[in-house]
Amino acid sequence: MDTSHHLLLLWMFLHYAVGSNSSCVKIIPDANDNISLEVGKIFTATCHLVGGSVYTSDDIEWSLENISIAKQSIRKLNETSVSVTIDVTSDMNGWLRCKAAKKTLSYVPPCIYGISLRAGYPPLKPDKLSCIAVQEDKDISPYLNCSWDPGSRNPLIKTTYTVYVQIPVSNMTYKADFEQQLASSHSVYLYTFPIHMALTVWVEVKNALGSERSDKLLTDSSSFAKPNPPLNVKVLTEVNIPNCLMVTWKHPIDRTILKLSYAIRYRKAASNVWIKVPESFTKDYITSFRLQSLEPYTQYEVQMRCIEENHSSHWSDWSTSVTGSTAEAKPASAPDLWRIIQPTSNNRNVTLIWKPPVKANGQILLYYLNISQDEGEFKRDEIKADKLSYSVELPTGKSANIEITAANSVGVSPKATLFIPRTDRELAGVENMSWSVRNEKPELEMQVEWTAVLPTYPGLHLSEYLLEWVKIPQDGHQTELQAGWQRVPYNVTKTTINGDLKKFKRYNISVYPVYKYHVRQTLQTHFQAGIPVTRPAYIQQGTPEYGPNVTVTKSKKNSAELTWEEIPLDSQHGFITDYIIFYAVGNTRQWKTVKVEPNVRSYVLTDLASETDYVVNVWVSTVAGSIPGMDYHFKTMKYGDGEVEVIVVVVCLSFLFLTVFIIMFCLRKREVIKKLLWPQVPDPSDSSIAHWSPDFPIKADMPKEDVSVVEVDVFDGKSLCEEDKAVLPLKKDKYLSEEHSSGIGGSSCMSSPRHSVSDSDEGDSGQTTASTVQYSSVVASGYKGQTPNHQPPVFARSESTQPLLDCEEHPDHLNDSGGHSRNSYFRRGRELEQGVLGQDCDGGSLTFCPVQEEETSPVVEDPPASALSYMPQQSGYRPQ
C-alpha cells in the first residue's frame, strides 16, 4: 500500500513538472529565461489556480530552492490566487516554486510551477576610456585596443559590452561587442589604421537591469599610436673628454607616419638612481646626443624612448640598457691613509694601510710612499696597486711624517698625510666609548657611541673622528690584519659601522680623535691621531664551536687538579661567560657541578673518595648557549701525600727497633744460646783414662776426660764386634749395677751414631746422649778371681755422636809424639783387619778392639771390684 502510494506521488511530480503546460497553477510574472532581480529591491509574485482545479488557495505553498517561505511573506488574494513578497539579496539565485496539494491523503495529483530568479546589479558607466594602437614593423597596427574603468561593482548577471569607433569624415563606424559580467578592455579591428584622421570612440554596457554609455573620445588618430623604442642605441667613449659620452640611435618609424622626439636617461652601473636628460634638449628629430658632466673612468647605463613630437601619442617603452665608460683622468682625490701600531720590545711595528682614492678617475697603477723621520731620515718607495699595506719599524723616541699619492695613466693624485708622534707626545683620546647591536632587518648593525673630546693645546683643532675595527686572528696577534675604518665628522659622537662585520667573529673596535695643527717651521699641516679607546665586540654571538678538553694533572687521595686550554678565538663565537665543571663517580652519572669564572683555566676538585673512578667534563658558555667538551676519566689515589712515607718510616723504625732488641737480647742471653746451639761434649783425647795405663805416658797439655770401665775378656775366641757380644754383662756388684755402659762389641757397632743405649739388669730405661755421653769402659783381662798381669788395659769406644778426635783421624801423629803409639789402642772399625772385628761390625762405627800381643797374656780370674773405675760423664763439649 505504501509503495503504491509513493510511486503514484512520484509519477504525479514528474507529470506536473515545473513549467508544465498541464499544470493547474501559474506564476506571474513568468519567463522562459531567468528573471533578473535587482539586489536591494522587493520582488512580488502571484500564484493562480487554473479554472476547474479541485484545489483552493488554502492548498497553495511557496518555496525557494526547496526551502519553504515563511507564512508572513505570503498573502491570500482570493480563493484562486496567493502572492508572495521577498527582499532580493545577492545570493538569491534559484527556483521560486508554487505548489497546490491537499493536506489529507488524496489520489489527486499535486500541481507545481516555478520560475528561475537571478539577482544582480545594473551596469555602471564606463570611465577613463583610452585606446592605443602599437607599432608593428614599419606601420601602426589596425587593432585599436581600448580600456576603461568598469567600476568596482560586479553586475552578477550577464552583461554585454560594445566598443564603437567612428570615423566622422567617412561616416564609418566599427564596433565590437561581447558578453561578460565585468570587463575593462576590448579591441576593435579597423582593417587599416587611419593616419592623420580624427576618430570618435565610446563604450556601451547593457544588461537586463539597465544600460550605460561612456563619454565619447574624439581626437586625432596619432594620439592612439604607440611607436617602438629607438633602434640601434650605442654609447661611445670620448677619448679626450673624460667627462662625456656620445649616444647615437636610429628612428623606429618613418617620419611621414609619426614625427618623433626622444628622451634619454642614464645612471652609474653600480647605482639605482636614474638621471634624465631634459626633454627640451632632445625634442628635435635627431639621432645623437652628448652626455656631459660625467665622472671620469666610470661606467654608465643609458636607455632611450620616443614619442610623437607634439606629445600627443603614447610614449614608447624604454630601450634595452646600453653601457659605456668615460675616459681616464688624473685622480681627483687622495688615498685614504691610516696606520696600525704594534709595540715591540724596543721599537714600534707600524703597518700603513690605505684605500684607493674615491675619485681615482682611472686605474691606479702605483702608489708613491714617502716616510720622513727625525734627524733627516727619509725613505721613498713605489708600491704596486694591488698592495694596500706597508710595514715599517719606527723607534719609540722618533716621530715620522708619512705621505702617499696614487698614480694612474694620466697623472698623480693629491697626497694624503699622516703624522706619527713619539710615544711620549701622544694626544688625548675619547672617553666613555661603548658599542651596541641593533637588529635592523634584514641585517644587524653595530652602533658605536663615545664622549666628545676637547683639544688641550693652543692651535690644536679637532678635525674628525676615526672609527676602526680589526678582526682578531686566531693566535690573538695582529699578524694578519683584516682591518676597516671610517671617518666621522668632528661634531658626531654616535655612528653605525658600515663595514661588513662577520657573525661569530671578534673585532677590536677603536675610536681615535684626529687633530689638525699647523707647523710653522715646515709650513705644513699635520694630522695626528690621539690615543685610542678599544673594546672587543661581536656583531652576533653564537654557541662555541666545541668545548674544552679537560685533563687531570694532579690526582690525589681526596682531590684532583683539572686543567684545560683556552678555546681559540675563532672557535669561541662569542664572549665566554663561564665554565661549568660536571663530575660524577664512575658510570653513575649523578653529576655534581662547579661554576668558575671565564678567565680560569684550572680548578681543584675536593671532597673526593679515595681509590675511586671519576668522570669529568667541562662545559663552556656564551650568551647564546653552552657546549660540552670530551669526557675525561681518572682515578683517585689510595694514599694521600706523605702517608706512604709515614708507613715506610714506621716499618723501617719498627724493624730497626726489633733488630736492636734481638741483638741486645742475644747479648744478654749469649751463654744460654751458646749452650742451646753448641752443647759441650767431652774430649776423649783429654780423658783421665790415659792414667790407667802404666805404660802410657801422660801428656801435660791433653785435657782430662773421664771414661767408664767395662770388663772385657781378652781371651774370648770370638770377635768383640759380633752381635752376640753386643750386650756384655759388665756389672759384677752393686756398684756396677748402677752404671750404664755399652759393650765393647756389637753394641757400639749396631747402634745409631747419635744415641748410646746401656743395658740394665734391673730394667732401667736407656738414656740418650743428650744428657749422658759414654765414651769408653776399661777392664782388665782375665778370669774371675784372678789378678790381671801388667799389660795395658783394653779400651773400647762407646757409642758417641761426636766426631773423631784428631788423634783418631790421624793416628800417625801420635807415633811422632813419642812413647807408645795410641793406634795400638784406638782403631776405626773399617781399618781393622778381619779377625780382629767380626764381619757383622758396622764399618761406619768407631770402636775400640783389643790388639793381639806377641805373647799371649795369661789367663786370670775375674778382676776385683777395685779394678773397675768410674768417671762421670760430660756433655756439651764444643771443639775449640
Image (cartoon, grey):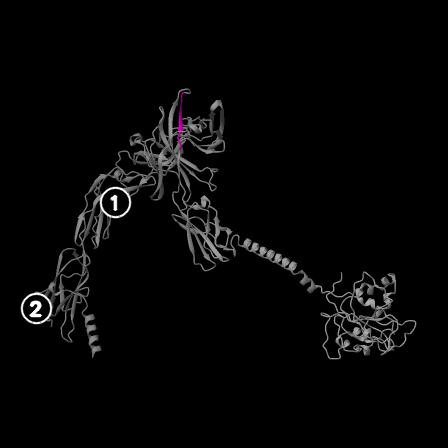
Q: Residue 771, position in %: x, y? A: 71, 70
**Mark 1 — residue?**
146
**Mark 2 — residue?**
79
Q: Could you tell me what secondary structure mostly forms the magenta stretch?
A: strand
Say which element carries label 1. strand
Tag 2: residue type? Glu
The quarter of the picture where residue 857 lies is bottom right
Q: Residue 467, position in %: x, y? A: 38, 35
Label 1: how many Cα within 10 Å (few below 14, some 14–19, many 20+): many
Q: Name the residue: 49% across, 24% down.
A: 377
The answer to whether 512 is drawn above or below residue 687 in the figure is above
The quarter of the picture where residue 802 lies is bottom right
Nearest the viewer among 275 and 847 is 847
Say which element carries label 2. loop
Q: Which image quadrant: the N terminus?
A: bottom left
Q: Is residue 482 magenta?
A: no
Nearest the viewer among 861 and 384 is 861
- Between circles 1 and 2, the one closer to the viewer is 2
Along the polypeptide, which appears first: circle 1 or circle 2?
Answer: 2
Q: Is residue 371 visible?
A: yes
Nearest the viewer among 545 and 196 is 545
Tag 1: residue type? Cys
Q: Which residues are magenta?
A: 523-531
Q: Residue 733, position in %: x, y? A: 78, 78
Quick check: 752 left or right of 583? right
